Image (cartoon, helix red, strand yellow):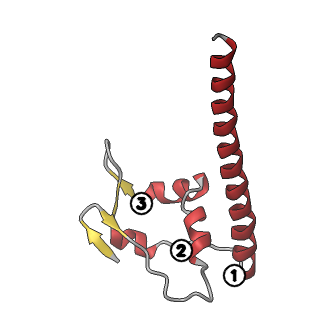
Amino acid sequence: MYLNSFCFGIHITNTEVAFPPYLSYYVSLTAFRKFIYPYAQGSTRFNLCKADFEKASIKLPTLADQKRIYSVLGHIDCKIETERQMLNLYNSQKQYLLRQMFI
């Protein structure tokens, strides 16, 4: 899917081969970034040539494995967010207690 001269998207039409939520994690991996480096052009900002990128062959795990990996990563993301919220609450509590200590 062509968005503009600097950006294009990937539209998944065959959901029997690729699980789109898994792909959101996959494209964030260092391994994927290393895979697309040969297709990148430019010195200050990399651009991908759509025609070259369309020729690339991306190897994916089976659909069942993609769903399993996505589920595990999703649970980890939820845990990280919960821990981040708890840290913020503890920091607020700490600030409150420090203010009360020096009144």
* Mark 3 or mark 1: whose residue is earlier in sequence: 3
Which label belongs to residue 63? 1
Q: Which residue is mark 2?
A: 57
Residue placed furthest toward the front: 103
Q: Which residue is mark 3?
A: 39
Residue located 39% across and 71% down the image:
9
* Mark 1 or mark 2: whose residue is earlier in sequence: 2
* Label 1 residue SS: helix
Report crowding for label 2: few under 14, some 14 to 19, many 20 or more residues within 10 A (C-alpha): few
Report crowding for label 3: few under 14, some 14 to 19, many 20 or more residues within 10 A (C-alpha): some
Give the CA separation, mark 3 to mark 1.
Answer: 26 Å
Label 2 amino acid? Ser
Q: Is residue 32 above or below residue 86?
A: below
Residue placed furthest toward the left: 5
* Label 3 residue SS: helix
Q: Is residue 15 above or below residue 41?
A: below
